[in-house]
Image (cartoon, grey):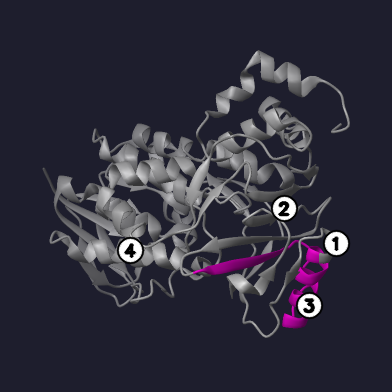
Amino acid sequence: MNSSLTIIGAGASGLLSALVLAPYYEEILLIDRYWPDELGVSQGTPQSHHLHVLLAEGQRLLSSLLPDVWQQLTANSLPVVDWGKDTWWKTPHGILTPNDCAVRTHLFSRHYFNQVLWSQCQQRKNIKTLTATVEHWLIAERKIKQLQFKARESLAIAGHVIEARGRASGLHTQLGLESLHVNNQYRYFSTRLEQNDWSTDLKAKQVYIQACPKKQPIGLVLSPIEGNALILTLIDTTGTIKTDEQKQAAVSCLFKKNQLGHIHCQGKSWIPYANLNNTRLIIERQRWPLNLWAVGDSIGYQNPVYGQGLTIILKQVDLLKRRGKVNWLKQKQLHRCSWMPWLLASNQDMSGEKNNVFQWLMQKLLRQASNDPSVGETFIQLLHQIKSPWILSNPRLILKLSRRGDYD
């Protein structure tokens, strides 16, 4: 058993890392400025007000890695959605045809997820906490030797370190790394509703109108969560939606235009979140500390069009659980977990649609998914990370995607 592990950041990345690695360390120290309250709300994760989906592969990993967490999470009745049949999904290329992908997941809010993770961390005797803001590290002999806090205090480091502060990590500045950067102008506004606030004749349990700056500048997501509630997130790429009246008008317009029924969101409070530019760090071997792992949004993040962030984190902590050396090669493996989500999330923000072969195939896949149920099934299985992105190199699928049709 290793002696100590220091985790910087107590968002989903930090809490999941602590819980999964707790059996392998004598002591784990979680450092953050803010902690979740009894409802799972933390000032350190403002994005948690929005819908966060744990995809099928993420739910499989969670139930396998942390069965006690999964049991507590699902102890109360949670809505279950069949992504092929229960989702009304409009992509920039058309409406997805219902299919038999057999992908079913539980839906819940990020606050509820944080609440469960935090309560489980508090039950682990070897997980300690420290309230502080880490400003920078001191590195010697290619290892992090000391954390310097904002209050001018410091902490000596003898073991391993996990950077889990997400977008606030500043890894590129601390280590002098370059990053791959794709600009976008997405702005998110979320509110919580009751089930009876939505009246519709649709059989679907959730709605997704995918925003795209070029073809569909305003979109939304409406999904059921625990407590017989709904989370409605409005997605704006125009930068023109500012007042509550404009948000309500945009939602009403989308529901009317797409014949989705009636939604009552007047007088609701909206939580904003904006400017989620796509960024991936370029990992350099000579600059990477030998006792550091970085997970989650600290090494790469995408606009959450497909909600893959939590599943990426679980794939990363699953790699960490497999032990082995803390080195640059292990970090590269952690980095690869975000390859497919990056391909999905950033393709519509790229200046050109055919940057490489996989980009070209992804465009074809998204276009034909609205016309061919079998392609739509493949798309959902790719999205939920049930199938590998290498399926895009399958000759039969390439032949199907290469056929010209209405989707071209």
In front of the other: 375 or 12? 375
**Of the image marks 2 and 3, the number of the one nearer the N terminus:** 2
- Give the distance between the C-alpha atoms of the residues marked 4 and 2, in whole angstroms: 30 Å
Quarter where residue 99 is shown: top right
| Residue placed under numbered mark 1 in the picture | 257
| Residue placed under numbered mark 4 in the picture | 116
For numbered disc 4, what is the local secondary structure?
Answer: helix
- Give the distance between the C-alpha atoms of the residues marked 1 and 2, in whole angstroms: 14 Å
Residue 162: x and y, percent? 31, 52
| Residue placed under numbered mark 3 in the picture | 246
- Give the distance between the C-alpha atoms of the residues marked 4 and 3, in whole angstroms: 35 Å
**Circle 2: residue type:** Gln
Considering every residue shown, the one lying at the far top of the view is 395
Residue 172: x and y, percent? 48, 52
**Of the image marks 3 and 1, the number of the one nearer the N terminus:** 3
| Residue placed under numbered mark 2 in the picture | 210
Instruction: Please report the residue visible at 77 percent of the width from the left and 73 percent of the height from the top.
Output: 241
- Give the distance between the C-alpha atoms of the residues marked 2 and 3, in whole angstroms: 19 Å
